[in-house]
Each structure stands twice: as C-alpha cells, then as structure tokens.
Image (tube, grey):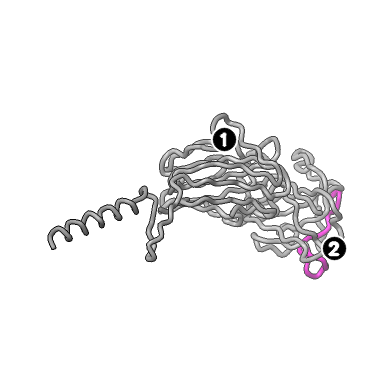
Amino acid sequence: MPICLVSLVAAAACTNNGTTQAALASVPSSIQPRPMLFSGKTRLKTFYPIDSQTVPALSGSGLVFQFDTTAASKASLLVFNSEQAAAALLAGNITSSCIGGASTLAGHSWTGATLSLATTASASGLYACIPGSAIQPLSVSQKVTTANFPSGTYYWVLIGYDANFLMTHSSALMPFTVP
Amino acid sequence: MKKNTITALFMFLALYTACQKNDSSTTSGTGTTTTTPTNPSCSFVNNYGSQVYIEIYTGTSLSYSEGRVYGKDTPVKIIPASGSTPQVVANGGNQSFSLTSGQNIIIVVGISSAFYYVNDAGFSNVTTNKTFTLDASGRIN
C-alpha cells in the first residue's frame, strides 16, 4: 500500500500514485507552518535548521543552511540575532542585529539549496551585513564565520525576487539555537 | 486397521485443534507458534530537546502539506483522541497509542504554544509494537 513519506529534506509536494493533493481528501491540522515574514508572498521552504532547533556545536563542521529557492529568480538569505519586524526590513534598512547573509543580488555564490557557515572565511558562504544600508546591505567581500555566532538564538529568513528585483517570495523567520 | 485409522484421524484432529490459535498466529517449521498482536502498542518518544506538540492520523496514503493532512480517504485523527489542541509531549517524554494491525499513520510535530510545524513522517502497515522517536535533528524514525 503506497504511502506518501515526507522527509526532512524533501521539497516536492506529496502525491499519491500521480494524484495531486487537490484530488485527495484532507482535514485541517492544528499544527501550521510558521507564518511567512512577508505576507502575501509565495512561500520559500526552509529545511535546516528547522523551527527552534538546537544545532550541533559550530566549532566542528560549522552549519549548512538547507532550503529551496529555485522558485524565485533571485534570492537572499539573512541571519539575525533577534526577531525582526517585516516593516523594518521592508523599509530597506538592515538592522544591526543582522549577523550575516548572502544574496544573488550581491553577486554571491548561490546554489538555491545550501549555504555554508564555516569555521574559515574561505569556506564560508555568508557575508557581513552592513547596518543601515538599503542599497548594499551585504558586503561583497567580507565573510562571516562561526566565530561571529556565539551561543544564543538566531533567526534566519529567505527572500525571493523576480527578474525585476521585486519581492515575490518569503520564508518564515525561523529561530534556531547555537549551543 | 479401519479402527486404527479412525483413531489416528481423531488423534490428528485433536492435535490440530489444540494447535489452533487466532488469526494472528503463525507456525514455524519447528512447530512452535508465535502470535503477532492484533492491536500493536506504539509509543512516540520526544528527544528533540524541547517540548513538542503532536497529532497522529490514520488513513490511506497520508501526507501533510501547508497545514492540512491529506489521504485517499478522509484522515482520522487518533492523537489527540478529541479536541483540536495537539497533544503535548515533554522533552524526553512519550505518548502511547494503540493501532489496529496493518494501519497506516502519519505523525505531525509542532512546537511552541502556537503549534508551529516542525516535521512529519508517515509509516505504513504497522503490525508490530513500535516506538517512533523524534530525534534532535527533527527526524522521526
């Protein structure tokens, strides 16, 4: 009897022998995805770290963010050390609570699936935030490493844009904890 | 000879009847009989590192997406047995439940008082007692 298994890293919508979800019976769950940071957008999926997860110590192999931004033409990933209000970010001001990130808008390397926070700058894919800069909120050269992430709770978000740089996609602002 | 044959037949029938169990039993080649439970006793164990909230559904071809549980037929929630509030499971704690042998289930896990989705996993044709564990990485095995 086939059953649709959804794994931690699976990105595709679940189907049953080719039947789409629209043709299946369903019931609402009281367990709901965390709301997108920017409402009214198409959701971008975050796979790791998952909601409120305590990740392994970064001093070992660092942290690899896992996600799916292939639906967006361009995308950014930002990591903060405190919760963010969408309005503040929409105003274009990256706050000082931004620790690091990467973006295709800045020409950073981007696979659409993973981004590494490593122990060395050469291996890390995250760049330093430039607080208050609406035009260039991320450095194009200065990297951040695990040394920039002491123990504590952080929040990461994905933002997607179309070819005209208009925001079209958003993920939830996902908390995770560094031990 | 005929009497001995009839006697042997009755003896065979008596032995056969004595060895009969319910529909859940199997007989190995050595003649020993094992019994599989008709109602598997299961348990969900939370090793995530923090308190979580769970829902467990039975049905056919179960899946979860964007806040809904899907199935070929309407999924039936068994945990919690009633009410809309997901079942809380303390960190390191467990939640027991029983199934009818052969049922399929999907376990949906949420976190915080807002029951934000963490992960889900489906298991088909559960016929034996089983423990489902949520580990620190969020995987359910």
Residue at the spot x=82%, y=44% of the render?
Answer: A82
Q: Position of residue A43 (x, y in %)?
A: 62, 46
Q: Numbered disc 2: what chain?
A: A
User: Which residue in the rendered view is the most extreme toward the bottom?
Assistant: A122
Categorize mark 1 by other alpha carbons within 10 Å: few (<14), some (14-19), many (20+).
Answer: some
Q: Position of residue A20 (x, y in %)?
A: 44, 48
Residue at the spot x=58%, y=42% of the render?
Answer: B96
User: Which residue in the rendered view is the most extreme toward the top?
Assistant: B83
Left or right: residue A54 compared with residue B104: right
Looking at the rendered image, the quarter that the C terminus of chain B falls into is bottom right
Task: Provide the residue span drawn in magenta.
Answer: A118-133
Q: Residue B80 carries which label?
A: 1
Q: Position of residue B30 (x, y in %)?
A: 39, 65
Which residue position holds label 2? Answer: A142
Q: Numbered disc 1: what chain?
A: B
Left or right: residue B27 compared with residue A14: left
